């Protein structure tokens, strides 16, 4: 979907500024349209809907694998046929490029 998915997350232990709203909006443009920027521009979120629990959990496991490989983990809400993923870089209390890299990689997980 974008060149973001070809990048690799870099460790973020703080000490850098979070992305501005304008920077976040520009980076969000490289993602699936389902990703929404929070009103305070400190996180991005997307809801995924599935036919059943098995497909939901298969997706969640694939997402978890990506998060572990990138060492950048979203907050998840999971139910029978949905998963809501929220990315924010907690160390800087806002968005970093890592959030968009992981979102772009998740965009490549088949939803069928």
Image (spheres, rainbow, N blue to C red):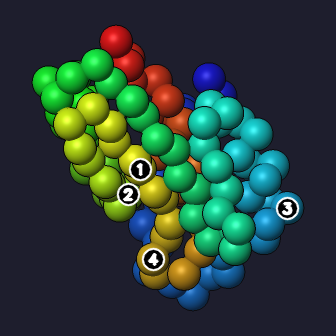
Q: From the viewer's perspective, is residue 42 above or below residue 79?
A: below
Is 74 placed left or right of 41 in the picture? left
Q: Which label was assigned to residue 22? A: 3
Q: Gap in Å between the C-alphas at discs 3 and 1?
A: 22 Å
Helix, strand or loop for disc 3: helix
Quadrant location of residue 75? bottom left
Q: Along the polypeptide, which appears first: circle 3 or circle 2?
A: 3
The residue positioned 26% from the left and 47% from the top of the image is 78
Q: CA distance from mark 1 to mark 4?
A: 15 Å
Provide the secondary structure element on which disc 1 rests.
Answer: strand
Mark pair 4, 3: CA separation: 20 Å
> Which residue bears the numbered disc 4?
90
Q: Which mark is residue 74?
A: 2
Q: At 16% across and 29% down in the image, what residue appears? A: 53
**Rendered image: mark on residue 85:** 1
Residues at circles 4 and 3 in contact by the CB criterion of under 8 Å: no
Q: Mark 1 Cα within 10 Å, few/some/many (few <14, many 20+)? A: many
């Amino acid at each position: 979907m974008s060149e973001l998915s070809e990048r690799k997350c870099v460790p973020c232990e703080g000490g850098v500024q979070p992305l501005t709203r304008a920077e976040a909006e520009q980076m969000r443009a490289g993602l699936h349209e389902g990703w929404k920027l929070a009103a305070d521009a400190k996180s991005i979120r997307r809801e995924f809907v599935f036919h059943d629990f098995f497909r939901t959990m298969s997706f969640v496991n694939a997402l978890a694998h990506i998060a572990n490989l990138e060492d950048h983990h979203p907050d998840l809400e999971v139910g029978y046929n949905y998963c809501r993923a929220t990315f924010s870089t907690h160390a800087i209390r806002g968005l970093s490029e890592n959030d968009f890299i992981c979102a772009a990689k998740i965009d490549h997980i088949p939803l069928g």
